[in-house]
Image: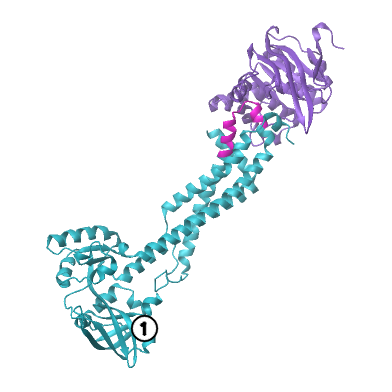
Amino acid sequence: MRATDGPYTPRVSILEARGLTKTYHVGSEKVVGVSDATLALEAGSFTVLAGPSGSGKTTLLNLLGVLDQPDSGTLLFEGHDVSGFGERARARLRREKLGFVFQAYQLVPVLSAEENVALALWIRGLPEEECASRACMALAAVGLAGLEDRRPDALSGGQRQRVAVARALVGEPVLILADEPTASLDSETAKHLLDLFEELHRARGVAFLFSSHDPRIVERAERRISLQDGRVVADDRAATGARP
Amino acid sequence: MSRWVRLAARNLRRHARRTFLTGSIVVVGFVAVTMTSGFVSQTFSSLKAATIRGTGGHLRLLDPRAAGKTDDEAAILLLDDWQGLAAIVKKDPRVVQAMPKLSFFGLVAKGEKSAAYIGTGTIPALERNASLASDTVVSGTFLSNPDADEVMLGSGLARALGAKAGDLVTVMATTPDGALNAVDASVDAVLSYPIKEIDDRLLFLPYAVASKLLRSEGKANTLVVLLKDDADVDATARDLSRRLEAKGRPVVVKTWLETAAFYRQVKLLYIAIFFFMGLVLSTVVILAAANTMTMSVFERTREIGTLLAIGMERGQIRTVFLLEGVLLGVVGSAVGAAASFVLRLILNASGIMLPPPPGGTRGNVLHVDFIPLAYGLGFAIMSLTLLIAAWWPARRAARLNPVEALGHV
């Protein structure tokens, strides 16, 4: 099964990278994380950054999610150049336009499921009641209604990842970036999570960008951007039938 | 703000053992501040009482020519008609008594031994009522007859003369016009004054005998006024000064504090010690709490990375960690206040005897005063200390790179 187009026409570019390059220094050695990456993501797209370990998937995801700054290149978000944004502007962009899902769930252990989701709204300074009701709705959307009061340690791995998805979703982002979201899950749970991603993508038109070498994600993505040694080596769209 | 307080509180509760250890340091710090304040306050009270009783009263009335003069210069100036002055002073309802003092020095001899003395002529009944001297009798009985040729000697002076209660001594002095005069007097009592230098020269005798010896009847170096309440000192000093001036008897009125250099020095010393202790205590609390907070930041690096990734402002991250510090300070202070209150009750009921305060003659039962200001101060110091302790770890947390923090193992 592959993701299909949502209610929006996925033609408008929300994110555009032009020649992004990022290098690291490991001791005295210079390591290329991403080199000259150029790509564009459309609204409502369902894309995976694929490649072996060390190919630069996570680095590119961090650059596209404005978590990290490139050494060179330009990043446009909804047509605006954000590569020169300062700390606060980048934090605001992440807060208001993006959602994040991490491999290890990254939930706050002392907060309940509802509070973990509401956290994404707390930081916007929204009123308590609004945060709580929107968090409950987001949890219901990921199939966790009734588990709002549970702390992360009282949830299974799959449930925790769903809470993380709800947290990414609750702020109504235009793009959710997910770094190896199924890596910590068993295959059955991973399948259910991918079903959820597809459902959210279809029903809400949210764009997803995954970083993964999980073949199940690669199989379902409508677009696969392959990386090797930090370079984009292929950009295949399912509709074109270019994927092997 | 409540959501961040909630988050801070839960994080503290999550690391219960660490929170308990740091909180215990805060509690001990708070108890130390309040108990030391209470004890020092009680010591000041004892010292104050001892100082006032040491001079026989709260106010000293001096000859108007003493204004602007040093104590030594003022000491040779005599007030005329102290009885008339005392009659006016005693009309003030705040006054208990007004006692003349005639101060002089000379030689006292017993047989072939003689020694220099510093003498005080006083009214025995008033002196017994007001001063420390009655507490220091080690042998014999305190002066009782206001007109009898009797003396009391400091134990050091008595030892130098080889005199004891019941012996006869010859007291010699120079009159204001330069003539040498002497009186034979029996030793009524030997006193043990707490300051050795004074004890070696101390001699008391009735005012009537002293004035006869000095041929200074009706005159006194000072009129010492004892008040009912310590709180009335300044107001009474002002009122008496005005009233006596209006009646044509201008005097210089000095409060006990103005003449108590020793009290002021001891108080300053205690305050300096207290301040130093507080500084050491605060440093210990800061180091312990900073260590705890740094551990917390280290352990929660990935969590901080997540918070930064989802768009939390660095200022908000800092606030969360600072709140944890302040919350620990507030809760620790609250527990410390309760512990101080209970400990104070226990100590005050214990009946432990303390040695005399500096310059005092009698020890006191341990009593720790309740000082609301110290509780407020303890609360402020501990909260501020924890805020300072949390500052650096909070700053470190807020400055983390989200990518590095997310990858922290």
Label the magenta part by its dominant secondary structure: helix
The crowd level at tag 1 (other Cα within 10 Å; few <14, some 14-19, many 20+) is many
Instruction: Reply yes or no: does residue B311 show up in magenta.
Output: yes
Q: Can see residue A40?
A: yes
State the residue in front, A8 or A96. Answer: A96
The quarter of the image holding the C terminus of chain B is top right
Which color is chain B depicted in? cyan
Question: Residue sitting at 24 percent across and 87 percent down?
Answer: B183
Q: Can see residue A184?
A: no
Magenta-colored span: B305-322
Question: Residue sitting at 70 percent across and 8 percent down?
Answer: A10
Reading the image, the residue beneath label 1 is B157
Residue that sits furthest to the right in the current view: A244
Dot 1: chain letter = B
State the residue in front, A154 or B47. Answer: B47
Report helix, strand or loop for mark 1. Answer: helix
| Rendered location of residue B231, percent (x, y) | 29, 59
In the rendered image of this protein, does residue B315 appear above or below residue B15? above
| Rendered location of residue B308, percent (x, y) | 64, 29
Query: What's the amino acid at mark 1?
Result: Leu
Instruction: Reply yes or no: does residue B385 show up in magenta.
Output: no
Which color is chain A depicted in? purple
Question: Residue sitting at 85 percent across and 11 percent down?
Answer: A243
| Rendered location of residue A108, percent (x, y) | 66, 33
In the rendered image of this protein, does residue A86 appear above or below residue B393? above
